[in-house]
Amino acid sequence: MLIESIPTRTGNGNQERRKVVLVEIPTYENILPLASGYIQACAQEDIEVGASHAFEIVSYPVTDDRHKLLEELAGKYADVYTFSCYIWNMRLVSWLLKELRERQPDAHYLLGGPQVMNHAATYLADAPANVYVCNGEGERTSVELFRQLNSATPDLHKVPGISFWSGGELVTTEAAPRISNLMEIPSPFLTGVFDGREFSMGILETNRGCPFRCTFCYWGAATNSKVIKFEEERIRAELDWIARNGLSGLFIADANWGQSPRDVAMTEHIVERKKEFGYPLVVYMAATKNRPERMAQITEIFVRGDLMVTQPISLQTLNPEALKLIDRSNIREETFVELQRTLREKQISSYVELIWPLPGETSESFQDGLTKLCRSYADTVIVYPQLLLHNTPMYHQVEEYGLTTEPVPSDVSEAEVVVATNWVTKEECRDAYWLYNAMHTTYNMRGLFLLSGYLDAAGVISYGDLFADVARYLRQRTESEVLRLISTSLADLTNYDVLLSGKIGHMILSTHREEFDALLADYVTAQEWWSDPMARQAFEMDLIARPYIYREPVSVPRYEFTEITVHGLGDAETFIVDVSPELAGLLAEREMLDADALTDAGSGRVTLHVNHHARQKMPYMPQRSLEHNANYCHGTVLRFREILPFVEVHPPHVAQTPAAD
């Protein structure tokens, strides 16, 4: 069937090329637009399409001025605009599409990406004649669409995997077969698509697909669990391009980096390029779920190669019932504990990822999971709110699992947050978020790290019960700016923003450090266990040892120390303190102090240097926006071990004057 309403052009040798503008709206600025790069590379390689079209990629972060972006796009006067659509930009894309169609009614618009695929009835609800939805991989569909739109007699039924309106009905063509040989896709890195542009973050695929079918995730569900790989020679060449062009960051966009043995060799290649060109500086990856030993090896290669990296451990939940319901096999608990021990011995950062509230998870099991993770000495635990994502099995299990969702009030994103399930009410869901924020501030951020470990090990109060008690206390302190940030994020559902952890870290480890010290002091001094001398010693050491997230001079907390003696500063970033042998032993038990160093310290008070210097810290830049600083802080939270202070035994000094209040 021909599409009569589509404007056509007469084909001739002097015909002006049709202009295609490929639009990407990522979460941060200067991210390499890989999806659009693939489409342009494929289209340019096609003899007919490449000869008759000119391509331009436009990339703006979601935080930029939308009106400025609209004016730029409208000023391109393109024949075709394509949009990469994700949960974080869909409302902004919808607004741009509406405005552009009014200004450029004769243009054509292609929507692709996981947010729109198979949901044409929603996004084409007003029956537009010139807007189309791609329902799978975009390369083949886009090229054929460009070909048909340029034809004298366009027939969109020949475009595979597309939805469009025709003759008063919504038509969806047969799905395009999945690309089985990824080498059919020309490399946008190696064909010049990205040449001449500056990027700070590179994105690289070495394969497509996922062998797992977790019901909350789009990756495996969309690819039928089949993993298809790019050839190694091409990957190495693309990594060379990234290093030569000075991209400071690299995100490896595989579902399971480390699943294949060749990933170790690719890791070594990245390190070699870093040594040769100085880039990349930092690597992000989604780690394989069932190869912890290989991932530890990969992370160690990166660390020894002087790249900033951390080991992600995607547990999602420790509840066996929840794991079964989400169709996910997890690494065994004993394997995780061993992995944690190995990473700690090598001084390599790691972080555990959880999702709340998954089907089958209760408030009690969630709290128990946090306790287990703390007892296994997890470096950092990050809890992501459960989002209901399009094109995932869970999207069709809403009624079965009693999922209640609420949309994030945003004119940019289209996130739907799960706020209740058959296992937890909305109130219980909110309580658990407060529980996690108590854990995030007191354990992840080391607010009560030594104290909580002591109380748990001594049987006074478990980690989970302590976090629950701290959560109740924090909810009452409405005058605190830090806690207002947390409270507001839960009220307006912006806690789904991954940068929230960075904003919290920015405040309690820097700009609002003194405020948080006072909050903690008010809490601990009101507890029954405060009569325990070791609890008081542990808290005072926590005040001194809580890390600084920026490179800045340390300052003695405004607190009347009674258990440890604070002599002052050895230098701008080092405290000198005297502690009891018992506290020194507790520091050794918590792996904050070398136990062997205590053998020569004698039986009396122990003098310690608490050195907060860390090579990879950045200075605080107050002229930058909170979002900019939060981005740095979030990355630092995931690599927290890199900013922990060095606690060392110092030989006895001549008596020094205690620091003034």
Image (tube, rainbow, N blue to C red):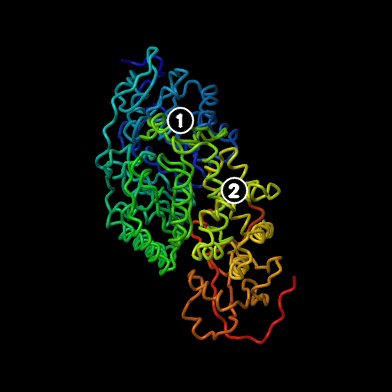
Q: Is residue 457 above or below residue 22?
A: below
Reading the image, the residue beneath label 1 is: 81
**Image quarter (top left, top right, bottom left or bottom right) of the C terminus:** bottom right
Q: Is residue 456 above or below residue 130?
A: below
Residue 637 horizontal/vertical position (percent): 52, 57
Residue 181, picture quadrant: top left
Residue 153 horizontal/vertical position (percent): 33, 18
Left or right: residue 328 versus residue 375 is left
Left or right: residue 542 versus residue 133 is right
Q: Residue at x 51, y 70 (%)?
A: 592
Residue 598 horizontal/vertical position (percent): 51, 81
The single residue placed furthest to the right in the displayed view is 661
Question: From where the camera sits, is residue 511 visible?
Answer: no
**Image quarter (top left, top right, bottom left or bottom right) of the N terminus:** top left
Q: CA distance from mark 2 to mark 1?
A: 29 Å
The local crowd at label 1, few if under 14, some if 14 to 19, many if 20 or more residues have their Cα within 10 Å, is many
Residue 65 horizontal/vertical position (percent): 60, 37
Disc 2 versus disc 1: nearer the observer:
2
Q: Earlier in the sequence, mark 2 or mark 1?
A: 1
